[in-house]
């Protein structure tokens, strides 16, 4: 396959893997695709460690990093204890529901430790993003992607001067045009069926809108892609490649804990629901008692100021994890989670995707022969 | 193009037009596609009149009808005034909001007339459906589609004995399997981006699920299709054709009133929102003051018993129409409403769709050459 994306980044197949797991990133790039490490939640030290590992394992293949360049994130003063930044009423609401449902509470030490550890990773301020970028640009990254927000001019220039490309994830044609105006080289157009933060327009409708809006800038299709037929659809709709996240969560290379894997393996397409309880913004994640709690009529409003709801959600997530309570666990995932059923290798996922893509092409030829 | 759907119904292009307008139905079939008349809201007399007109204009090309076979619809006793069946509190809520916003009220006569006329068309009982079927089977219909619910065995048998095919609209693989078990010949798989009643799973994810679940029964793709690239995606995903509704609303042949056309021409993809205010069930329709009203915290719960909310919505809809208040108008439409921008002919829509489909095929060939 040859598309603007394979040319831009010198890869064999236009399959991009977004993952928080370094093993998934390296395995994708080694298989001929392009791995992108989700670094937004990492500290600079952690990112350094992960990129070092990738460099040692990726056999010289190209890879990228994904981070947040949000101008709207609240700068959290980490001298304070983050728990005190979260309204007590909101903490109490979710903790009482878990109490009533027999989920053992965290020890005070565990809870405090969680807030201290978690909050450190949620520093979405411009300074924090640039500190991550400092680390990334000491490694042979070929692509830096903004998962949220238009990066400042000097950031995009720095990446270009370094010799890497700049990408951006968007959920509307307007956002895509803003990113292109800022100098972005490649757009990731993400439909509403995607996992994580997502807009309202479905992939089928959104992709061609964005392709037309930013042409000739190449567009990667994201949201709802886990198999070859969906990749064929993406290319037919004008995309130059596919950007997948959910499909890697259950792979052998994924670092997800066994309980969470079970949750994902059991989930159907309509279990991937929009919740405000995860981060305070609309985010598609697996339905659980946690996501349902925030829909109750007596629930406090989710905290909108980034990253407050994310800080708040850390405690109940750890609580569910410690107690192995799968009914309270949730994880950001898209509707194709229904395809995530067993631990296969990243290479197998990619191979199957390409095989089914080829089958779809054969089918199209037959339909059109007549 | 040659697919299982073109073979099954002896048509040239696997493009199905669902429409309440007889002119759209006839124009589609004459252009080589397959028109399906939405008859659910019609009285038997009205349907007879429409089918007679189609027979006189369709030049012998095949066409179909679409109706509801709901076992859950409440049998409305039309000896009562339907207005009295609707809770006074719910009527008052919406009427007061319109009062406050300066929308002139209907005259008592007009309001009463509306309820009497409207309710007659909302007879979704099994008896009412069979009365419509009696009419349809006096005309050369080639396809009867259930828009909602599994039709009783004897109904499907009657259609088959008549020599027509039976289809069914579904939003999940489970529903599709039930329909196939009941003897349905062709499935219309409708993703969440569609107009009207819709499920939660997007077309990109849903279509291949359903194709696999019911193979070898042919599947038509619905939801999010208004142009050739989307049709190419549908075929790539395993569909045997496309079923479109929204794209015809703005055509020359559509009977939609000028005000409502303006509303549709102005709407963007994210203006097609899910509302419970239209029918009591999740229904995608154009955002307006009417749809927003039912999201207010002081709004009464929409009436769930079919067809009560539909009866209720008739009065404010007529009120907005009489006053030419576009800000209060809404109409069931899918996310591709963004493509509905001017009055073009049905033939042009079909021609453009086939042309862009061919372009998408060329593009795919280029991508795969390498």
Image (cartoon, coloured by chain):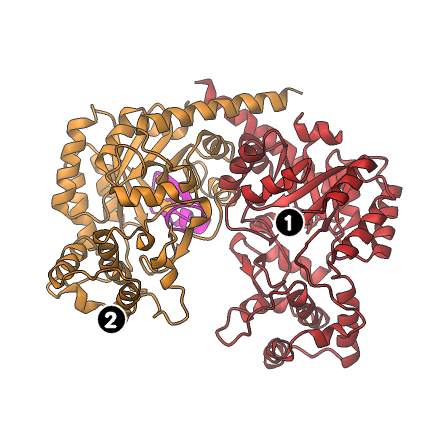
Chain colours: A orange, B red
| Residue nearer the viewer, A229 or A74 | A229
Magenta stretch?
A170-198
Along the horizontal axis of the image, is B298 left or right of A96?
A: right
Label 2 secondary element? loop
Was residue B239 drawn as part of the magenta stretch in this picture? no
Q: Alpha carbon of mark 1 to alpha carbon of mark 2: how far?
A: 46 Å
Label 1 secondary element? helix
Return the residue at label 1: B246
Other residues around mark 1 within 10 Å, as few (<14) / some (14–19) / many (≥20): many
Was residue A184 drawn as part of the magenta stretch in this picture? yes
Q: Position of residue A289 (x, y in %)?
A: 35, 58
Q: Position of residue B143 (x, y in %)?
A: 75, 39
Q: Position of residue A265 (x, y in %)?
A: 36, 40
Disc assigned to residue A87: 2
Residue positioned 78% across, 56% down in the render: B127
| Residue nearer the viewer, B130 or B221 | B130
Establish if B321 lies above or below B102: above
Q: Position of residue B3 (x, y in %)?
A: 65, 27
Tags 1 and 2 in contact by the CB under 8 Å rule? no
Query: Circle 2 marks a residue in which chain?
Result: A
């Amino acid at each position: 396959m040859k598309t603007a994306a394979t040319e831009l980044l010198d890869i064999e197949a236009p399959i991009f893997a977004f993952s928080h797991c370094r093993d998934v990133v390296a395995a994708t790039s080694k298989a001929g695709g392009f791995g992108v490490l989700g670094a937004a939640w990492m500290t600079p030290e952690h990112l350094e460690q992960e990129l070092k590992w990738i460099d040692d394992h990726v056999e010289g293949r190209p890879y990228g990093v994904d981070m947040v360049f949000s101008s709207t994130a609240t700068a959290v003063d980490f001298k304070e204890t983050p728990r005190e930044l979260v309204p007590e009423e909101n903490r109490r609401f979710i903790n009482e529901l878990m109490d009533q449902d027999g989920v053992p509470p965290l020890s005070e030490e565990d809870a405090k430790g969680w807030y201290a550890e978690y909050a450190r990773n949620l520093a979405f301020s411009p300074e924090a993003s640039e500190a991550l970028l400092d680390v990334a640009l000491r490694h042979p990254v070929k692509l830096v992607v903004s998962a949220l927000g238009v990066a400042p001019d000097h950031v995009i220039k720095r990446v270009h001067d370094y010799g890497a490309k700049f990408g951006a994830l968007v959920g509307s044609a307007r956002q895509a045009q803003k990113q292109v105006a800022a100098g972005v080289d490649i757009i990731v157009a993400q439909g509403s069926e995607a996992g994580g933060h997502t807009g309202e327009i479905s992939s089928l409708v959104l992709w061609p809108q964005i392709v037309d809006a930013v042409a000739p800038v190449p567009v990667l299709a994201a949201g709802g892609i886990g198999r070859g037929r969906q990749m064929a659809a993406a290319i037919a709709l004008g995309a130059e490649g596919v950007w997948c996240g959910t499909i890697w969560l259950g792979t052998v290379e994924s670092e997800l804990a066994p309980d969470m894997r079970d949750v994902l393996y059991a989930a159907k397409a309509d279990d991937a629901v929009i919740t405000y309880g995860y981060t305070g913004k609309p985010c598609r994640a697996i339905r659980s008692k946690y996501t349902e709690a925030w829909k109750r009529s007596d629930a406090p409003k989710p905290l909108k100021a980034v990253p407050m709801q994310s800080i708040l959600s850390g405690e109940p997530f750890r609580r569910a994890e410690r107690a192995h309570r799968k009914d309270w666990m949730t994880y950001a995932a898209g509707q194709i989670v229904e395809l995530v059923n067993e631990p296969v290798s990243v290479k197998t996922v990619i191979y199957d995707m390409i095989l089914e893509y080829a089958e779809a092409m054969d089918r199209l030829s037959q339909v059109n022969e007549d």
